Every structure is written in C-alpha cells, then in structure tokens.
Image: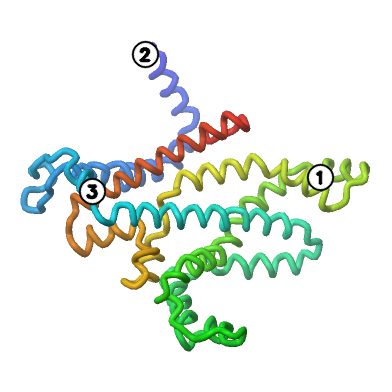
C-alpha cells in the first residue's frame, strides 16, 4: 500500500512539475517562518534565559500558565478581548455585506468605481498613519471636538476618556476595513446566475424582494465561511492599533491579551510568561474555530472542512 502511495506521488509529480514548482516558495515560506518558529514556543514551559538557550533552560511545566490565570490582569484582558471582538463582529461584520449589496444595485458604473476607490483607500494607509489621524482628530482641538461643540458638547481629549475608547476603535475599524472586505462579497455577487433575477422579475419581485430571495441566498455560503474565519480569530484583536491608541488612562477598557503579551514580553522581557499567554490565546482561537465550523456544518451543511 505504501509503495503504491509513493508511486502515485511520483507519477503526479512527473505530470505536474510546473505546479509543484509554483507551490515550492509558499511551502518554504511556511516551513521557515510558520512551523520552525513553533519550536521557540516551548519556552512557555520553561524558565527561559538567553544564556542557557531554549534546550538548556529549566523545564517548569504549566507554571507560567497558572501564573497568568491567577494574575490580576487575567479577567481584565480576557473581558476586553471578548468585548472588542464581539463588537467587531456585531457591527463590523455585517457592514461589508450591506455595502456590497447596495453597491451591486448601483447601475451607474462610473459612480460605482469612484465609491469603490474611495472606500478601498483606507486599507492602503499605514496603521501608524491611521492611529496618528485618530489621535489628532480626537485631541481637544481636533475635528471630532469641533463637531461635538457644534452639537452642544464640551471639549475633551476623547482618547483619554475610557468611555470613548471602544466606540472610536470600532468606528475607525469599520471605516478602515469595510470597503476592502466588501470585495469578496462583490466577487460572490458576480457569480449569482442573472437568470434568477430575471425569473424573480417575471414573478413580480421588486428590487428589495430580489435582494431578499436571490442575492442573500446566493451570498449565504460566502457569509458563512467568512463568519467562521472571523470567529476563529476572535481573540486576535489588532494589538498594533491598540498599542498605538491606548494609554494608562484607558488600560481598563483597552488592554487586550495581545497588547498584554507585547508589554510583558518585549518591555518587561518576561519571555516565558508572555509565550504562555500567547499559547493560551491561540488555543482559545482554535477552539472557537472548531466550534464555529461544527455549528455551521450541523445547521447549514457547509463549513471550512
């Protein structure tokens, strides 16, 4: 059986040499930068010191995991991570779908291209620049405060107020990603058979009913796949943006697991402890991914695998 299996691989390789060569750089990339570095994650189970190296450091089992679970920061970073992720899914996930459906209904192709270009632009702006713009606009003399004063409010440094942080983070996230993320839904819309719309029109369906009974069912498989992927990354709140925007005054609502890992690992140089927290984060993500895929397969018949 093994010999036959090897023979099949050899025959397939001879037939598809070019395809194997194309995929070779990708395989090398993943081996070098995704799988080999996993060896370094073993420091989560050791008291790592650079002098002794990974192999020579003392094995301490789950000591750093238990330390994190007993930490004062455990519930705070866990709650903030879940809250921001939930808000991102609740408000950020449907917006690209709605935007793609509305854009698909626009018949003027020049207006459509202009809108697409304008909404895609924020994706190409550096995150540092985005954070700089948010910080500047949220300052006491910024445009957000000008609008606040216009509607009867008082000036304040918006990012210094913990009550504003989550709203600013989620709103800016939607602005930055909605246009770009709508591309995949627009591509899925292109694949819907136009005869379905014609048949719906003959049956007397207006534009809203066509969206309801043709467009949305056509988009459902794509929406499910994207939702599963999104749930599988529920603990991956963009820590770069958090780090660029938060400050000690907003730690209570802004500090998430990834920003905590950054502080502990790179600032406090507690590498083993930060690795343990990172592994805990990855395990939770993986659990959510499996759970979402299982629920999807049970109730819709579709999933990632």
Check disc 2 and report the residue beneath it: 3
Which circle, 2 or 3, is nearer the viewer? 3
Q: Which quarter of the picture shows residue 165?
A: bottom left
How much space separates mark 2 and mark 1, taking CA atoms? 50 Å
Query: How many numbered marks, from 0 up?
Result: 3
Check disc 3 and report the residue beneath it: 70
Identify the residue at horizontal 35%, vertical 41% (top origin). 283
Check disc 1 and report the residue beneath it: 194
First in sequence: mark 2 vs mark 3: 2
Q: Position of residue 222 (x, y in %)?
A: 62, 43
Q: Residues within 10 Å of mark 1 (few under 14, many from 20)?
A: few
Q: Residues within 10 Å of mark 3 (few under 14, many from 20)?
A: few
Q: Which quarter of the picture shows residue 204?
A: top right
Establish if 264 lies above or below 161: above
* Colour scheme of the rendered structure: rainbow
Q: Which mark is residue 282?
A: none
SS for tag 2?
Answer: helix
How much space separates mark 3 and mark 1, taking CA atoms? 58 Å
Establish if 46 lies above or below 84: above
Q: Position of residue 264 (x, y in %)?
A: 23, 59
Q: Position of residue 304 (x, y in %)?
A: 53, 36
Q: Position of residue 251 (x, y in %)?
A: 34, 66
Indicate left or right for 250 with 301 as reference: left
Identify the residue at horizontal 54%, vertical 81% (top origin). 144
Which circle, 3 or 1, is nearer the viewer? 3
Question: In front: 109, or 53?
Answer: 53
Q: Residues within 10 Å of mark 2 (few under 14, many from 20)?
A: few
Which circle, 2 or 1, is nearer the viewer? 1
Establish if 132 lies above or below 19: below
């Amino acid at each position: 059986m093994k010999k036959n299996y090897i023979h099949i691989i050899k025959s397939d390789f001879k037939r598809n040499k070019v395809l194997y060569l194309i995929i070779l750089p990708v395989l090398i990339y993943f081996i070098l930068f995704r799988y080999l570095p996993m060896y370094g994650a073993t420091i989560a189970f050791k008291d790592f010191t650079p002098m002794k190296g990974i192999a020579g450091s003392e094995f301490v089992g789950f000591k750093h995991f238990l330390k994190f679970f007993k930490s004062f920061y455990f519930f705070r970073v866990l709650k903030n991570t879940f809250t921001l992720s939930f808000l991102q899914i609740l408000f950020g996930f449907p917006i690209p779908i709605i935007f793609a459906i509305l854009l698909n209904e626009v018949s003027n192709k020049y207006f459509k291209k202009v809108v697409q270009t304008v909404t895609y632009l924020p994706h190409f702006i550096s995150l540092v620049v985005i954070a700089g713009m948010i910080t500047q606009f949220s300052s006491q003399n910024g445009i957000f405060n000008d609008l606040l004063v216009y509607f009867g409010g008082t000036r304040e440094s918006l990012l210094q107020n913990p009550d504003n942080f989550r709203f600013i983070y989620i709103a800016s996230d939607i602005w930055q990603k909605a246009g770009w993320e709508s591309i995949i839904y627009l591509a899925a819309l292109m694949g819907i058979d136009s005869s379905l719309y014609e048949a719906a029109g003959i049956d007397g369906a207006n534009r809203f009913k066509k969206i309801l009974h043709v467009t949305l069912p056509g988009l459902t498989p794509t929406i499910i796949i994207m939702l599963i992927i999104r749930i599988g990354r529920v603990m991956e709140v963009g820590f770069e943006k958090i780090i660029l925007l938060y400050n000690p005054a907003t730690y209570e609502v802004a500090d998430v697991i990834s920003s905590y890992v950054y502080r502990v690992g790179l600032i406090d140089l507690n590498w083993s402890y930060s690795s343990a927290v990172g592994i805990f984060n990855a395990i939770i993500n993986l659990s959510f991914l499996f759970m979402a895929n299982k629920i999807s397969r049970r109730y819709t018949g579709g999933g990632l695998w």
